[in-house]
Image: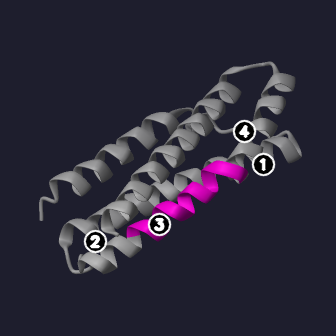
Amino acid sequence: MYLYLKALHIFSVVVFVGGTLTMGLLLRFIVRTDDRAQARRLTETLLHWDGLVTTPALGFVWAAGFTMAFGAGWFTSPWLLLKIGPALLLSGVHGLGGMALRRFLRDGRPVSPLFGLMPMVVLAILAVIAWLAVVKPF
């Protein structure tokens, strides 16, 4: 059963990170473009995808991850406790990106230039999570 959960977890992580990176790239595009009509169309499409695919994948990431951790007795492992911090941060970055896109659609408010950094932030957090999960240094 563990291997099936691990496969679901990894698949869900790939889908979630792919969607979150796409969101970050769209936010970067919005920050840099003057074509508001195209930005709105892309935002509508991405938010639809996010609701159907990316956000449910995030739910599977957490559900499969917690199930594996309970089953393996890892909740006292320092590496897992450290991994939860960046995982929460990555979930929060996804949530903030989604809020910025919805605000852009609803109010036409400009997106903060800081969102242009979102793809790099996502990759940096993912690197820390992957290192902790694979190396289990503590």
**Cα distance, mark 1 to mark 3?**
24 Å
Left or right of residue 20, residue 109 in this image? right
Between the residue at mark 4 and the residue at mark 3, the CA separation in whole angstroms equals 22 Å
Residue 120 location, quadrant: top left
Three-letter amino acid code of the residue under disc 1: Arg
Q: In which quarter of the image is residue 42?
A: top right
Measure how far apart labels 1 and 2 are at the Cα level.
32 Å
Rendered position, 64 above or below 27: below
Residue 31 in the image, given as x and y percentages of width and height: 67, 28
> Closer to the observer: label 1 or label 3?
3
> Mark 2 highlights which residue?
81
Identify the mark nearer the N-term, 1 or 3: 3
| Amino acid type assigned to the residue bearing label 4 in the image | Leu
Q: How far apart are marks 2 and 4 (CA)?
A: 32 Å
Badge 3 amino acid: Trp
- Of mark 2 and mark 4, the one earlier in the sequence is 4
* Element carrying mark 1: helix
Sort mark 1 into few (<14), some (14-19) or many (20+) by Cα contacts within 10 Å. Answer: some
Q: Disc 3 or disc 2, which is closer to the eye? A: 3
The residue beneath circle 3 is 62
Of the two numbered discs 3 and 2 on the same chain, state the one appearing first in sequence.
3
**In the image, residue 41 above or below residue 46:** above
Residue ID for mark 1: 102
Q: Which residue is depicted at the point 31% across and 53% down?
A: 129
Q: Is mark 4 on a helix, strand or loop?
A: helix
Mark 1 or mark 2, which is nearer to you? 2
Q: What residue span does the magenta drawing correspond to?
A: 52-65
| Distance from the alpha carbon under mark 1 to that under mark 4 | 10 Å
Q: Magenta: predominant secondary structure element?
A: helix
In which quadrant is the N terminus drawn? bottom left
Circles 1 and 2: CB atoms closer than 8 Å:
no
Residue hosting label 4: 46
